[in-house]
Image (cartoon, rainbow, N blue to C red):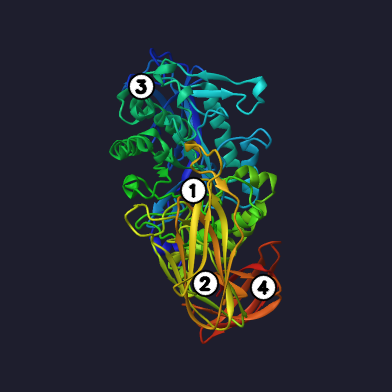
Amino acid sequence: MPFASILALTVTTWFGPAQVAFDATIPGNPYDCRANDVRVVFAAPDGHREERLAYFDEGRWKAWLTTTHPGHYHATLTRNGELVAGPAAEVVVPESARLPEGFVHAQGTRFVTDSSQPYFPLGHDLCWRYPDIPPLTELLLRMGAAGMNWARIWACAWDEKNPVLIRHNAYAPAEKGTWREAAPLGEFLPAALRQWDELVSAAEASGIRFQFVLFHHGLFSTRADANWNEHPWNRANGGFLDKPQDFFTNETARDYSRRWLRYAIARWGHSPSVLAWELFNEVEWTDAIQKDQNWPAVLAWHNEMAAYVRSLDPYHHLVVTSSAVQHPELYAAMDYYQPHAYPREVFTAIAGNKPLPGKPWFYGEFGRGTSELNKNERMVVRDGIWAGMLAGHAGAASYWFWERVVKLDLYGEFAHAARILKISQLPAHLPARPVAVEILGAKPAPLAVAPGRGWGASTRFHFDLPGDARPECLTELSSMIVPSPAAEQPPRPIEFAFTAPADGQASIVWAGIAGAGAGVRVLLDGKEAFHQAWPALPNLKASDARSRQPAPPPVVLTYQAGSHTITIEGLGPAWAQLDRLSLSDLGRTIRGYAIGDSDLAVLRVQADEGAVPATVDLRIAGLADGLCKVNVMDLETGTEREQAAAIAGGVLRGVALTARDAAVVITR
């Protein structure tokens, strides 16, 4: 069934934008929207009227009109509901200025445009410019050329996009220094506002829709990425806030926040390239949460600001915040969920985490759980993109390290995913869900069990393998092997139960040891097989809580055919980090994950070295019998191959695989 039929949407067609400007003198602060609520009324000859917020720029009052009613308009300026003396403006919105898709809205757990087309976010973060890569305007064009349609950009000071604070030469060598420019209290910096004009224009030219991140955690933090010491609202800098926590409750701060939201809507809200107003990046890292745990104040601020945005935005842009999905109440007034994830095992963590119900869900940031460049960063990116696609999320997971996309030329990963989305039309298949796939003919191989949780504690302690090696199970397994948090409680060990088809071995591979030291005991069938204590680093300070030591050698256990249990127990004082457990012959040389319905299946198929080329049969749950078309893409090179085939008895036979990492699309 076509996507539009499923959603039964009314198509809305937009035209524009057109701009008017007035040389009007209005007393007082032009950014104070309570004293100066300046708007433009657009009146058409047929009596149609529309009102838009005006904004102050370069000594003039301006307004944009994007409308569903093209034609000639007579525009007049008002202040606080009263006509401002002066000549009116004439503007034409021609029918030729049709916006083909319009704005994006949430519909159930997916996104849809005003033209009734599905929108599936695919892209990476693009939050600020680094000095050794091209400007963001150029990178937006590169993203569009690679088939991406989503980005996320911050209003941050260090690349001069924050409306109240600019830090010049932020990336210059220390000896050259930096200098700071702050807006007068209650006003905005024109140079920062012009940056956003350029970004919106570049996004429009590239076909990118971006999340406009209005506030970020560092502005109101003394601990996490702290910018509070230079914020102009800080009383120490001549401001009015005694501490960053007051941002959420101080009436002046809330008034100034509303000014920024209103100004953004007035100046850039006309553009469909603004996907969403993101109120806050990772609010959980502000001092209001880290020091005071004042969730009620943070929730009240979000609810107030979301309602304020919706009261002003004539285009009904999406409203969102990001990261703290452990507090779902934060999203009560938001249009979609946007978690962030930095696990050690990217695919498992993203594909295995169950979305919160009722709204679209996709990851706005991901990376492997380290700030260092990984040995194969390309695979990290691929894992995140495909995890979101195959898990049935509303968009692909969005990679955080955009400078690595540029420097490592990772654009092909996004281009390949965009091509698969086009071939499969997956976003239009609302019934599609993750489904089981069996690759018949694949030979036995070691089973790798990798934790899907990073620093968080385990919530599951017993795993029956290989069945519980699925992402949705492994997201409950932390990589941190730690002692019990309470001294009077016995340690809670992790158990892995399995039946070995033949004599084999287990390998426990570590990722690192806490700088404070750790101890681990490993049992095989209840008998101690390994016991090791690692001392703390010398001269360790209290501030070095997250310091780490290199990974020790793997623990190798041998066993005979039959049923076994391996138990891993943390003894402390701190953590040992588990990278993976490997078990002989419990896995397969070729593995696959799939999403689909009765008429579609999209798979990612991975093979061990030496396992391909091979011809395999696929049993995919839910795929109906009949003729079909099979497209196979090598995810390394983008090389495609198409073949006609048939599904009989639930099995698709004779799929030729030549790549170790391939996408397979089965369509009618």
Looking at the image, residue 340 lies above or below residue 256: below
- Upstream in sequence: badge 2 or badge 4: 2
The quadrant in which the N terminus is found is bottom left
Q: How far is mark 3 from mark 4, CA to CA? A: 65 Å
User: Disc 3 residue type?
Assistant: Asp
- Upstream in sequence: badge 3 or badge 1: 3
- Residue at the disc numbered 3: 242
- Residue at the disc numbered 1: 364
Q: Secondary structure at mark 2?
A: strand
- Residue at the disc numbered 2: 600
Q: How far is mark 2 from mark 4, CA to CA? A: 15 Å
Q: Is residue 157 left or right of residue 633?
A: left
- Upstream in sequence: badge 1 or badge 2: 1
**Which residue is drawn at the image coordinates 53% and 41% (left, top)?**
97
Name the foreground residue: 327 vs 191.
327
User: Disc 1 residue type?
Assistant: Gly
Which mark lies nearer to you, 3 or 2?
Answer: 3
Q: Secondary structure at mark 4?
A: strand
Q: How far is mark 1 from mark 2, CA to CA? A: 27 Å
User: Disc 2 residue type?
Assistant: Leu
Q: Quadrant of residue 492?
A: bottom left
